[in-house]
Image (tube, rainbow, N blue to C red):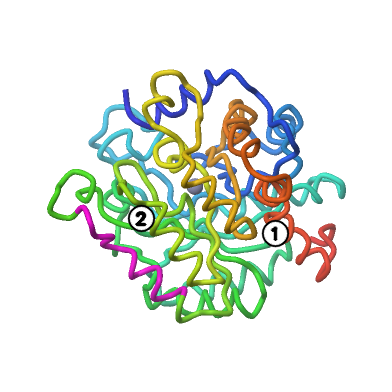
Amino acid sequence: MSLSVEIDLRHKKYKEDHTDIKVIDMHMHFVDFRQNSEGYESLLRSMKRGNISKNIIFGLPVKKKWEFFEPLEPHYYLGDNSRCTYYNATDEVVASGFLKLNKKQKMTIAPTLCGFDPTDMTCIDYIEMMFEKYSIWRGIGELLLRHDDLTNLTQGEVARANHPALNRVYTFCAKKRIPVCLHQNSTCVASSLSNLYKNDYEYLHELTESVERFQDTTFVWAHCGVSRRVQHPKYHEMINGLLSKYHNLHVDLSWEVYDSTICDPGIVARENKYQPKQEWIDLIEEHQDRIMIGSDLCGHFDSHGKTMARYNSLLKKLSDEAAQKVASGNAEKMYFHAFDTIRSPDSP
Ligand SMILES: [Zn+2]
């Protein structure tokens, strides 16, 4: 059983199916790796069931190709040896459905733009064209940069947070006062497998170089830079240090980081229970203005409520003020409030 199937099954079997307090899901892909989606109606239903008041949604910048040498059609990027290719139309899928929503529904969804090759020096042209075409975008991302197996399976140059092609994207975000969300592994998978590398974060400088250089840009670091097999015994110390140093840096606790790093992974695997470690509770309390939660689902929403309900145990352990900010306040401020004062969400 692949790790992705294992995580998905675990979340589907989780006993709680809605959050105790209203939350905003800050990290969701509207499509899967074949660029298929259950659609907005299904998403809105799952939000209601799960007590999820609002959702930030993005497409997926890459599409899994079905290459002729594979006898069966793949459904996930890790499914076989077929490569992934960049796929602009993901943004059209997100936009065309969004524009059909009524005014009230639009107020609950914040779409962001992601469908471009982040190593193409001309990618800014596409971004400017899409912002001109649709005035719905409330951010850029999730850009898939250093991403272990996905990087290996994506055709073209290795994408990274300090790639020169992204300089103009970061400047664009600062000018528009919108956030950019990045998937950038903090290190390579070998770091958790080999003692040789275990004290290093091999790819971290690629992120910090850009965060430091573009101080007027708001960065959201997806899953705190954790991915499958990306581990470090003192991970919270690194995150604490970066959040203290860079005030334009924010993180989300979606996907793998909550199961494998913030909570005790043994208890998660054995009992399907989520017990956040005290050092993370302290960290989240301290940096409560710059931390958000999300599901990281891709195109299929039946486990939406259960995936978000994992955070009940964390939110309960925080002060009321911190819990409210992490659950919804920070995402509201970053993706909804600022935008609503600039333009009406009803405009096309
Ligand atoms: Zn994601």
Residue 202, position in %: x, y?
A: 26, 62
Question: From what the image shows, is residue 282 above or below residue 79?
Answer: below
Residue at image position (74%, 30%) is 45
Provide residue 187's location: percent of width, then percent of height.
29, 56
Q: Position of residue 171 (x, y in %)?
A: 55, 80
Image quarter in which the C terminus is found: bottom right
The CB of the residue at mark 2 lies under 8 Å from ligand 1: no
* Mark 1 surroundings within 10 Å by alpha-carbon count, few (fewer than 14), some (14 through 19), many (20 or more): many
Magenta stretch: give its range. Answer: 198-211
Quadrant the N terminus occupies: top left
Question: On the picture, is 212 further left or further right than 84?
Answer: right
Disc on the earlier residue, 1 or 2: 2
Q: In the image, is 127 to the left or to the right of 224?
A: right
On whether residue 268 falls in the magenta region, the answer is no
Question: Image quadrant of residue 146?
Answer: bottom left
Three-letter amino acid code at the position of disc 2: Asn
Which label is found at residue 335?
Answer: 1
Q: Secondary structure at mark 2?
A: loop
Kind of element beneath mark 1: helix
Left or right for 333, reference 248: right
Q: Residue at the location (43% across, 51% down)?
A: 62
Q: Nearer the viewer, residue 315 or 57?
A: 315
Q: Residue at x 23, y 57 (%)?
A: 199
Label 2 Cα neighbours within 10 Å, binned few <14 / some 14-19 / many ≥20: many
Q: Percent x, y for residue 12?
A: 53, 22
As drawn, the label of residue 7 is none
Alpha carbon separation for disc pair 1 and 2: 24 Å
Kindly identify the amino acid type of the residue bearing the numbered disc 1: Tyr
Looking at the picture, tell me which residue is in the foreground, 115 or 274.
274
The answer to whether residue 139 is above or below residue 10 is below
Q: Which residue is mark 2?
A: 185
